[in-house]
Image (cartoon, rainbow, N blue to C red):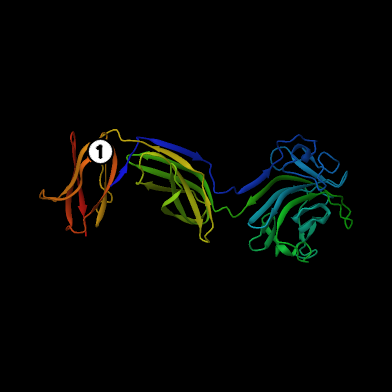
Amino acid sequence: MQKLYFTAFAALIFTSLSFGQATIFQDDFEAYVAGTALTLQNPVDWVTWSGGSGTAEDPLVSSAVAFSGTKSVLITSSPGPRDVVHHIGDLTTGKYKMRFRMYIPAGFDGYFNTLQDFAGTTSLWGMQVYFYAGGTGNMDAGGALIQAFTFAHDTWLLVEVMVDLNTDWAEVWLNGTLLHDWQWSLGAFGAGQINELDGNNFYGHDDPSTTGPGMWYLDDYVFEDLLIPVELTSFTANANSGYVQLNWITATETNNQMFEIQRQSSGSEFITIGFVNGHGTTTETQEYNYVDRTVSTGIYSYRLKQVDFDGSYEYSDVVEVDVQAPLEFALDQNYPNPFNPSTNIRFGIPESGFVKLSVFNIVGEEVAVLVNGNIEAGVYNITFDARNLPSGAYFYKLQSEKSVEVKKMLLTK
């Protein structure tokens, strides 16, 4: 016999959870003071090439033009050159995207690079892109000057760099169009280097082959993890009528095979109590639920183990629920019903004493006694196995010293 307890309502709700954070870092530069050096204001996320903040190398926050809000960062070669690096930190696995907006006034050059290793004069370039004053461009990416392109001055350009360290592949996109893709570990010039990702460098490059000095504006920089499998927006646990109801919602899913539901009681380890299939890959909101009917009194912790089709997994944050004792005599409808060959019967008694739970056929003959004796107050979940009985309607009766209740169930074979 499995003893269960319940409370009328108990829940702990978490919102805005995730199995990872798709946006690792972003900056629209609105929080900074215009006319002041960027890394001087935020030395944690931005560094200069030489590591000094507030120097002549440090680019200034500008209010001259902006893609969003009122501020951007001016990257220029005069006075300068000025440059800034978002130091990512020696990533060796995963799939990532760096995207930003750049504005190059007519008559000026623009330039940026993405680094396999950021180490000053011994840095390793994964790629670099040149935007020339005449509206043409080229890039070193797996080979020197490997891909020419054109662009428009005096307008905001969307630049995206994707690096997949798991497959050793990279792509560069301009305004939604793929410019070039290549084996990332070949490095900028195709000599072969390392399959790592360490930083994005924005530099006031003055190309001697052109007449334009380097000057452009950087805005809305975002660094993303593209392999986040599930974006979980809520996860709740509620205890009511002898069970715990779990509900969760996802905003997006990628390669999501299933959720493994895990439970922990006081002083024990997490155990797996069930599974719910995922929706694979989707950008639509999905709602899930799971009912745990095997709890007893006390505080329980629940978490979700999200499993990809390739076997990789992530854990959600933990939700807790307090399951307490019943307040009234109650006999629930059996579940499932109709059933074959077994079903569960749950009942609750508010105080200790004699209880009998028995089953009768349609003519009133007693065919099974499931409980018969003194038991403690609580909620009980009893399994009734009817494999030796014929199909038909049956009644089950719960009787205590003060109360009695009868319900009907249907066996179908």
Percent position (x, y) of residue 200? 74, 51
Percent position (x, y) of residue 214? 84, 49
* Residue at 20% across, 40% down: 355
Q: Is residue 175 left or right of residue 387?
A: right
Percent position (x, y) of residue 176? 66, 55
Name the residue type under label 1: Ala
* Residue at 70% across, 36% down: 31
In the rendered image, the quadrant that contains the C terminus is: bottom left
Quarter location, residue 354: top left
Question: How many residues crowd mark 1 within 10 Å: few (<14), some (14–19), many (20+)?
Answer: some
Q: Is residue 278 left or right of residue 372?
A: right
Q: Is residue 209 visible?
A: yes
Count up the numbered dots.
1
> Which secondary structure lies at badge 1?
strand
Q: Is residue 307 left or right of residue 227?
A: left
Q: Is residue 158 visible?
A: no
Q: Is residue 278 left or right of residue 365?
A: right
Look at mark 1 in the image and give the residue it sits on.
330
